[in-house]
Image: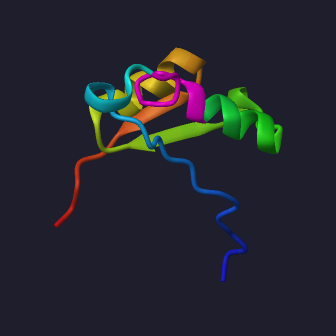
Amino acid sequence: EYGAQIDAFYFCPHHPDFTGECNCRKPKTGMLEQAINDFNIDVSQSLLVGDKPWDIECGKRIGIKSYYVEEFI
């Protein structure tokens, strides 16, 4: 109805207890860096909405305005 679409999903398949450290597990910025690269995203015109503190930390680390929202159940 509004012309929005989802172009990609990104996820981290790693767990530090089993696979060791990686650059894609939040609050590290690997997944955001990949999306920025894949879609030529202008970080200054972007915002991140997350429901976990590490989501917000990740966004701030890469310079994206980040907003925390609580889950609604």
When asked about the image quadrant of residue 34, the answer is top right
When asked about the image quadrant of residue 40, the answer is top right
**Colour pattern:** rainbow
Q: Residue furthest front?
A: 18
Mark count: 0
Magenta segment, which residues?
A: 22-31
- Please tell me which residue is depicted at 65% across the width and 37% down the height of the picture: 46
- Please tell me which residue is depicted at 38% across the width and 42% down the height of the picture: 50
Instruction: Work out which quarter of the rendered image holds the C terminus and state it.
Output: bottom left
Judging depth in this view, the residue of 45 and 36 nearest the camera is: 36
- Is 45 drawn above or below residue 39 in the view shown? above
Judging depth in this view, the residue of 39 and 49 nearest the camera is: 39
Instruction: Look at the image and say whether residue 30 sits in the magenta stretch.
Output: yes
- Please tell me which residue is depicted at 66% across the width and 57% down the height of the picture: 8
Q: Residue furthest left?
A: 73
- Residue 51 horizontal side relative to residue 23, left or right: left
Q: Position of residue 11 (x, y in %)?
A: 49, 47
Judging depth in this view, the residue of 73 and 20 nearest the camera is: 20
Instruction: Look at the image and say whether residue 52 sits in the magenta stretch.
Output: no
Q: Residue furthest right?
A: 40
Q: Position of residue 62 (x, y in %)?
A: 58, 19
- Is 29 drawn above or below residue 47 in the view shown? above
When asked about the image quadrant of residue 44, the answer is top right
- Residue 15 horizontal side relative to residue 43, left or right: left
- Magenta stretch, main secondary structure class: loop
Q: Position of residue 1 (x, y in %)?
A: 66, 83
- Residue 73 horizontal side relative to residue 59, left or right: left
- Please tell me which residue is depicted at 32% across the width and 26% down the height of the picture: 16
